């Protein structure tokens, strides 16, 4: 990947066999710089897959990158909820433990290392999300 900031698009898909994560990376000039498909055996819950995809993407990302996802849960968790969860001992407002706490703690640790933005997007406004989804389907077919 080039030294400039990138635009990262992530998507997931799941079946009874497991899940797939697709990652597509563009530079700020709109040039495709990387694409990956990650098969995830044993994962069939979209919520957990979305969080794993966010962690993978944040590990890949560099300072200043923008991550686009269709997961409202990940976007809101990253931008709105995570700090409050931490302050409350990883509990939600109803006092119940945060689900997938280990993954959210990984997200928190990674966001402390570098600045990235996580933005909600749809495939109708960001064609690259369709490409990421196709990569996720390709990953799923490898299981």
Image (cartoon, grey):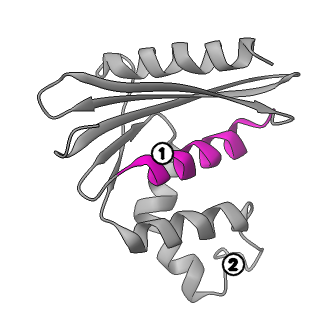
**Does residue 73 appear anywhere in the picture?**
no
Left or right, 143 with reference to 5? right
Pair 2/1: label in front: 1
Q: Secondary structure at mark 2?
A: loop
Q: Toward which corner of the image does residue 67 lie, by quadrant? A: top left
Badge 2 or badge 1: first in the primary sequence = 1
Residue drawn at (63%, 13%) of the image? 138
Label ID, residue 91: 2
Extent of the magenta region: 44-61
Q: In the rendered image of this protein, does residue 76 appear above or below residue 136?
A: below
Q: Quadrant of the N terminus?
A: top left
Q: Secondary structure at mark 1?
A: helix
Q: Toward which corner of the image does residue 115 lie, by quadrant? A: bottom left
| Residue 31 is a magenta residue | no
Q: Toward which corner of the image does residue 86 lie, by quadrant? A: bottom right
The front one of 110 and 3 is 3
Residue drawn at (11%, 28%) of the image? 29
Q: In the rendered image of this protein, does residue 18 appear above or below residue 60?
A: above
Residue drawn at (51%, 70%) of the image? 108
Q: Position of residue 80 (x, y in %)?
A: 43, 65
Seen from this angle, which residue lies furthest front?
A: 2
Mark 2 residue crowding within 10 angstroms, few (<14) / some (14–19) / many (20+): some
Q: Position of residue 25 (x, y in %)?
A: 34, 31
Left or right, 33 with reference to 109? left
Q: CA distance from mark 2 to mark 1?
A: 25 Å
Task: Identify the residue position indicated by label 1 in the image.
Answer: 57
């Amino acid at each position: 990947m080039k030294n400039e900031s990138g635009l990262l698009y992530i998507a997931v898909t799941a079946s009874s066999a497991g899940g797939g994560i697709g990652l597509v990376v563009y530079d700020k000039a709109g040039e495709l710089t990387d694409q990956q498909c990650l098969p995830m055996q044993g994962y069939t819950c979209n919520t957990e897959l979305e969080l794993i995809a966010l962690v993978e993407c944040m590990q890949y990302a560099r300072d200043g990158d923008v991550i686009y996802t269709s997961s409202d849960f990940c976007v809101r968790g990253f931008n709105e909820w995570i700090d409050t969860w931490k302050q409350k001992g990883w509990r939600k407002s109803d006092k119940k433990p945060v689900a997938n706490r280990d993954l959210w703690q990984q997200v928190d640790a990674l966001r402390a290392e570098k600045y990235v933005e996580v933005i909600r997007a749809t495939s109708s406004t960001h064609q690259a999300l369709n490409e990421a989804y196709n990569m996720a389907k390709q990953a799923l077919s490898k299981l």
